[in-house]
Image (cartoon, helix red, strand yellow):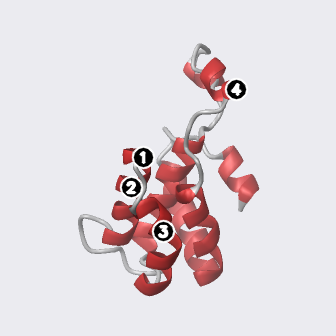
């Protein structure tokens, strides 16, 4: 899972269908990993701060990029809410607005009905 996130490019949304399918097949085993992408400290590292000066094609995937992807996957795969709520609890009460809004999005689910499972 970690390797997939490292190679993910946030602006290439054609990757999302593959990601959703992959994590849906993993089932509840993937939920703690995905929730961990949201609940960890999202402050940019010194490297991420330095990399902002690079042209976009050379910038690495940031912790915030990973958290946004994890929230989207969780929202669309709709894992058991009890399990997800417990894992996201630290982010839901966080003072970090990015973190708390991503956790709320992950719990709320997609803005439209989910696509049928393949």
Q: Is mark 1 on a helix, strand or loop?
A: loop
Q: Which of marks 1 and 3 is nearer the N terminus?
A: 3
Please tell me in which quadrant of the rendered image residue 50 appears: top right
Q: Do the residues labelled 1 and 2 touch (CB within 8 Å)?
A: yes
Disc assigned to residue 88:
3
Q: Where is residue 18 drawn, in percent x and y? A: 56, 62
Marks 2, 4: nearer the viewer: 2
Mark pair 1, 3: CA separation: 13 Å
Q: Are marks 3 and 2 in contact (CB under 8 Å)?
A: no
Looking at the image, residue 104 sits to the left or right of residue 117; the answer is left
Residue ID for mark 4: 47
How packed is label 2: few (under 14 Cα within 10 Å), some, or many (20 or more)? many
Q: Which of marks 3 and 4 is nearer the N terminus?
A: 4
Q: 106 and 27: which one is in front?
A: 106
Marks 1, 4: nearer the viewer: 1
Disc assigned to residue 100:
2
Q: Earlier in the sequence, mark 1 or mark 4?
A: 4
Residue ID for mark 1: 96
How packed is label 1: few (under 14 Cα within 10 Å), some, or many (20 or more)? few
């Amino acid at each position: 899972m970690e390797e997939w996130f490292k190679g993910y490019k946030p602006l290439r949304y054609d990757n999302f269908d593959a990601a959703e399918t992959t994590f849906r097949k993993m089932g509840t085993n993937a939920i703690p990993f995905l929730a961990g992408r949201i609940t960890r400290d999202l402050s940019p590292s010194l490297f991420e701060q330095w990399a902002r000066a690079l042209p976009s094609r050379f910038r690495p995937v940031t912790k915030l990029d990973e958290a946004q992807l994890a929230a989207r996957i969780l929202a669309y795969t709709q894992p058991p809410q009890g399990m997800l709520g417990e894992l996201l609890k630290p982010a839901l009460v966080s003072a970090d607005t990015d973190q708390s809004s991503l956790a709320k999005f992950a719990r709320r689910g997609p803005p439209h009905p989910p696509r049928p499972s393949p």
